[in-house]
Amino acid sequence: MKYDSVKKEFNSLEAQTSSDQKQIQSHKTEIDQLKSELKQKQSDIDKMETVFIKAEVSRIKKRKKNATPEELAFLEKHDKKEAA
């Protein structure tokens, strides 16, 4: 009798462990997919940032006489990066 209850408990725990392992694997797969999506989005942001900076530099250069000190500092910082 005791053997049967222990075996039943063991089988129950084994089934739960199997279920937990499947759930963990599912979460790992989801995490991998999200990491991949994040990398792609970061790549897109990096590309957009480059385009934005070029447009901003062009805009500031066109109106350099009326540029704010922050814009001039941005332009100077960008020019230093370009020179390097």
Image (tube, rainbow, N blue to C red):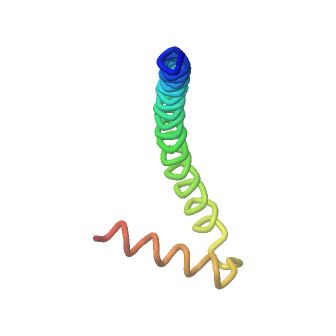
Find the residue positioned furthest to the front.
1
Find the residue positioned furthest to the bottom.
69
Left or right: where 83 falls relative to 1: left
Q: Is residue 65 above or below residue 59?
A: below
Instruction: Please name whichever residue, 25 or 43, is drawn nearer the observer in this view of the structure.
Output: 25
- What residue appears at the point 67 percent right and 69 percent down from the top-left corner? 63
Q: Quadrant of residue 73?
A: bottom right
Q: Is residue 12 above or below residue 74?
A: above
Count every numbered label the image shows and give the total.
0
Residue 22: tell me if it is visible.
no
Left or right: where 81 falls relative to 9: left
- What residue appears at the point 49 percent right and 48 percent down from the top-left corner? 46
Question: Residue 11: x percent and y percent?
Answer: 50, 17
Q: Is residue 28 above or below residue 8?
A: below
Question: Residue 79: x percent and y percent?
Answer: 42, 72
- What residue appears at the point 47 percent right and 18 percent down from the top-left corner? 3
Question: Residue 1: x percent and y percent?
Answer: 54, 15
- What residue appears at the point 52 percent right and 40 percent down from the top-left corner? 38
Residue 13: tell me if it is visible.
yes
Instruction: Please name whichever residue, 84 or 25, is drawn nearer the observer in this view of the structure.
Output: 25
Instruction: Please name whichever residue, 13 or 70, is drawn nearer the observer in this view of the structure.
Output: 13
Question: Residue 72: x percent and y percent?
Answer: 58, 79
Quadrant (top left, top right, bottom left, bottom right) of the C terminus: bottom left
